[in-house]
Image (cartoon, coloured by chain):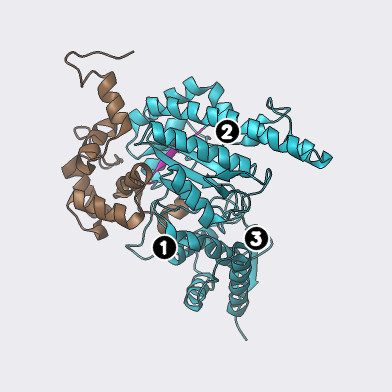
Chain colours: A cyan, B brown
Amino acid sequence: MERPVRTRLGDGSLVEMTAGEIREDLLAGTEIGARRAKAPPLTGAEIDHLLDIFSTESKFSAVDMGDEVCLSFDGSGNLDSGTRVDELYSYQSHRGADMLELFSIDYSYKAIKTILSYETQAMKNAQLNLIAPTQYGAMPDLGRYSMPDGPIPNWSELMPLGRIQEARDAQVAAIEHAVRDMVFVAEGMWEAGADGMDFDTAGAAGDGDLLATLTAIETIKGRYPDIGIELGMAGECVLGMHGELTYRGTRLAGMWPKAQLEVAQQAGATMFGPAVNVNTTKSIAWNVARACTIIKPCMDIAEIPVHPNVGMGVGGVPMSPYPPADAVSRVSRALVDILKCDGL
Amino acid sequence: MACTHALASGMGGMRTAGDLVGRMQMTRGMRLNEAKAYVAERLGCAVADLADPITMHDVRRDLGLGRIPVQELTYPTHAGAMEAKFHIAEVLDVPINSVARFQECAGLDRSRPGGTV
């Protein structure tokens, strides 16, 4: 009889599973990922390697020496001690961050626009005190432009009423506002010395959200060719809130990571962060196998670095305020070993 | 979580050459292996050395790329922060936005010292 090992579910809770049960979860995870993303399932050797990682009880797991990757640390700092520059310095000096990101707790470009002078001063101070490359990050957050928070009719209210064309028109109108705000903030940040911009959780409000982001990136990159631009996604599949929006002739709704990467590259992004959401009721082995399967097609066509999102509740990392190190380290290692990604 | 990722798979940031490889990724869009090879060539070391804090401590000292001051080791007479970024721009042969802004604001690229607007 197989001896069970302790592993975790997607919510971080401990469970006991045998190696056979973990293998079944790995196979199920890759199968559902392959079916949903229309991607090949992981190979037998890859499943075996993941089984090696997830079927031990060691407290920690890590990549081999020489296989280390760059960590981009979106949203560096916890905003719980000192100034934001102190936090960035802490990430640079004590947490091994390869890149840093200045951000505001109201993580939305619409909000940042109103405090841009304060934020750009913070960026200048950060740049004077830091060495690691430092970008500024926030969300495109298209939903904030709809009523009652914004000036545009609320498409989420119009759609249930069957007013589909009005809902679509509203999203197109919101895109104009969002693009203007993202470009405005990027201009200020570049002038303050930022190394790059991060458009994080792009597509959170659907295809319109992603189109706004791609349009802004194209404008910003055209204006500042040396600026770094990270496009981080909100989820694995772009929701078709509008449904008919296209970027350079390609429909955005329903895009999976490989197609998302293609449009990110076309727009001029220098880094891409695919996001695969965690199922909290499934094991981390199941979640990692699914995430690897969905993201893997990116790696064959990538012309820019791919940094899968591995924060709380994405990429296989448990959805918990304090993700356990045994789980996080296994997820970290598994994604790097299987995907050969450029960073996390 | 940040520490766990750093230990499990990260290059090590400024303890090694992680920030330098990261800079090539962020601002030049270089993929990992390309960025590692480029940085190793510019530093005159092997790719395998890039994530080794012992080797990189000396490389960073020799090239003035900045190091992390700690209780036992401080570097008051060596390049730090903005000073180190001047060297990084030169060694990696890449423009660094904050360095260009600093030069402009400090009047380093003008015939007379002074600020800008």
* Disc 2 versus disc 3: nearer the observer: 2
Relative image position of residue B33 (x, y in whole percent) = 32, 57
Chain name for mark 2: A
From the image, tell me which residue sits under label 1.
A340
From the image, tell me which residue sits under label 3.
A13
Q: Amino acid at mark 1?
A: Lys
Q: Earlier in the sequence, mark 3 or mark 1?
A: 3
- Judging depth in this view, the residue of A66 and A45 nearest the camera is A45
Q: Quick check: can you spot residue A42?
A: yes
Tell me the element at label 2: loop
Measured Cα–Cα span from mark 2 to mark 3: 32 Å
Is residue A16 left or right of A41 when viewed as pictured? right
Magenta region: A98-103
Relative image position of residue A162 (x, y in whole percent) = 82, 41
Few, some or many residues within 10 Å of mark 1 (<14, 14–19, 20+): some
In the image, are marks 1 and 2 on the same chain? yes
Few, some or many residues within 10 Å of mark 3 (<14, 14–19, 20+): some
Q: In the picture, residue A133 is in which quadrant?
A: top left
Q: Quadrant of the N terminus of chain A?
A: bottom right
Measured Cα–Cα span from mark 3 to mark 1: 28 Å
Tell me the element at label 3: loop
* Disc 3 versus disc 1: nearer the observer: 1
- Judging depth in this view, the residue of A217 and A33 nearest the camera is A217
Residue B10 in magenta?
Answer: no
